[in-house]
Amino acid sequence: MLKDLFKKHLAQTTDFLPIQLEIERAEGVFLFDKNGKKYIDLLSGVAVNNLGHRHPAIIEAIQKQLDKYLHLMVYGEFVQKETVELAELLASVLPQELNKSFFLSSGSEAIEGAIKVAKLYTKRNEVISFKNSYHGSTLGTLNLLGDEKYKRNFRPLIPNFKSLEFNNESELQKITNKTACVVIEPIQTAAGMITPENNFLTKVRKRCNETNALLVFDEIQTALGRSGKLFAFETYNAQPDILCLAKSLGGGLPISAFISSQKIMKSLENGHPLLGHATTFGGHPLSCSAAIATLKTLLNENIISEVEEKSSLFIKALKHPLIKEIRGKGLLLAVELGDKKLVKTFIENAINNGLLTYSFLFNETAFSIMPPLTITKKEIKLSCEIILKTLDSVLI
């Protein structure tokens, strides 16, 4: 059986709840297993499939690129039309200062690249992040991980990393003239969709200005319309010095980027004897073609403008005695049940009822709602009916 081979040959990262669905195909907001059973996908591959599964524009772009070429050379050596076009397109929709991209394959790589360029540019070595944050699982990004239990077995890690309390203004004085950069999510996703309060991101920006530290925004989950804006930082009146993207950027293919100014990115050339940062598959033409199609579709269609309304439909419909709170922004929502065992039972029952969701790394008492942004009102209604039905079964 395929599941037996799955367990035998694929190393696992958790024993909490490996979903182990045998998916044969996917379309729009639906996954279909080997028996033809249909599941509404409220995870989007963890905020990856913002345009749903197999969006026609993305498929067409991939098919066209397949007829040209795939990998040609390691990142940055050849002039590839797709890579240049994506970088130009990103620069056109970002603030003027964010005009130079470095493409990689994963979010962790983008965060590590941002930290490296910040150290080269500032000639400082202290890096600050926030508790209950997640920025990746490599040894470098583990330093930023906002929960000690997930990284203690890998110590010693890199020195001079500090972790502050999110939404605690008094903690910002710990950002000093020794700080190279502050890495922060505009919305803390792994913590269960914690949003900034009392202009917190603006205050972080101000403190970075005062100390000449660089501000790095991790928008790996929050970008490309998921918060209701193309980029979440647009909502919170705080512009980063370096922006990190991944997940939804490739429309289902692996690609990431860290983006900054010409001046800051020049440090990669001048600050190191040879390879300030390097990658083999970064800017892969297939992934860049998919990313261009993704971004153009989001810009040219009324998808992002409908996100807030769709968010409200979920929030208004999900009234139940077991629901304590619904947090988040746009289609980045956390439904708080207040009990870890209850959430685990709910997730299992929801899958049986044809709906896919999950809990959070740093909050196992809530489940997530992160559907494709293209989800229809009818599909939202159906999703909510399944959620309420499942909650009723758990309550009984």
Image (cartoon, rainbow, N blue to C red):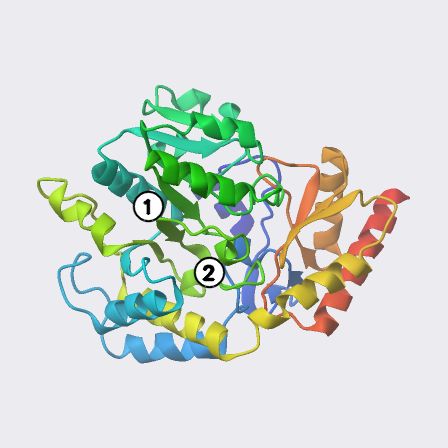
**Mark 1, other Cα within 10 Å: few <14 / some 14–19 / many ≥20:** many
Residue 161, x across and y down, in percent: 38, 26
Q: Which residue is found at the position 44% from the left and 43% from the top? A: 205
Residue beneath label 1, please? 109
Find out whether the residues at labels 2 and 1 contact each other: C-beta distance under 8 Å: no
> Considering only vertical position in the picture, is 340 above or below 243?
above
Give the quadrant of residue 78. Answer: bottom left
Is 60 on the left or on the right of 4, as rendered?
left
**Mark 2, other Cα within 10 Å: few <14 / some 14–19 / many ≥20:** many
> Considering only vertical position in the picture, is 6 above or below 91?
above
**Disc 2 or 1, which lies upstream in sequence?**
1
Question: Is 301 or 165 nearer to us in this picture?
Answer: 165
Q: Is residue 363 visible?
A: yes
Q: Which residue is found at the position 60% from the left and 47% from the top? A: 19
Give SS at disc 2.
helix
Residue 300, x across and y down, in percent: 48, 79
Is 24 on the left or on the right of 358, as rendered?
left
Residue 27, x across and y down, in percent: 57, 71
Instruction: Name the amino acid, label 1.
Output: Glu
Residue beneath label 2, please? 248
Residue 314 - label = none
Instruction: Name the amino acid, label 2.
Output: Ser
> Considering only vertical position in the picture, is 351 above or below 296?
above
